[in-house]
Amino acid sequence: MKAFAQLVGKALEALVVIILSAMSILVFLNVVLRYGFNSSINVTEEVSRYMFVWLAFLGAVLAFSENQHVRVKMLTDKLSPVGRNILSVFTDLAMLFCCYLIVDGSWIQFNLNLNNFAPISGLPQGITFLASTVAGVLIGILIVVRIVATIGIIAKGESK
């Protein structure tokens, strides 16, 4: 299971690198064409906007998987290890509920905007909302795994 999680993490990292590289190349090429040759590729603005949305949400998944998000530990440092683990389960449950709200709302928006097309590229505008759906599902899976691991630690009587 851990090997599969690492494989998915590496695939996400590769996808983020590809998106960032493609977005950088498109924007750079457009700037060179605009200022050097007084022309541009119209589609680059829309495509780079879609790529940036996906980059932000996939980056959030990667940051969450590596526990890189900002957190305040002022209260948790004063708790016992068991109290810290119990509080961790409750906060993870709250985050899981938030993931549900994100997935539910963004899936509705995805379906509503699937038939709205961007004026230049013709891409469905629902693609941007699909990014938050995918990110919410992936973060939700990570939270469930973390909850199960923390409950296992609590059951064994160990500390994190």
Image (spheres, helix red, strand yellow):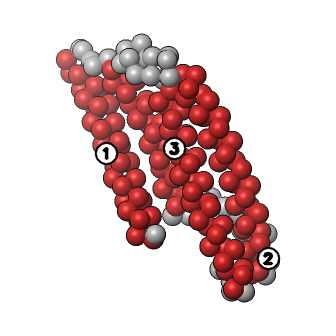
Q: Which residue is mark 2?
A: 83
In the structure shown, which secondary structural element does the residue marked by tag 1 occupy? Answer: helix
Residue 122 position within the rendered picture, expressed as x and y whole percent measured from the top left: 38, 17
User: In the shown orientation, is residue 133 left or right of residue 123?
Assistant: right
In the structure shown, which secondary structural element does the residue marked by tag 3 occupy? Answer: helix
Circle 3 residues within 10 Å: few <14, some 14–19, many ≥20: some
Sequence-earlier tag: 2 or 1? 1
User: In the shown orientation, is residue 1 left or right of residue 95?
Assistant: left
Q: Nearer the viewer, residue 57 or 157?
A: 157
Q: Nearer the viewer, residue 42 or 116?
A: 116
Q: Which mark is residue 142?
A: none
Q: Which residue is mark 1?
A: 18
Amino acid residing under circle 3: Val
Asked which quadrant contains residue 38, the reply is top left
Q: Which mark is residue 134?
A: 3
Circle 1 residues within 10 Å: few <14, some 14–19, many ≥20: some
Q: Residue at x 59, y 34 (%)?
A: 107
Residue 28 position within the rendered picture, expressed as x and y whole percent measured from the top left: 28, 32
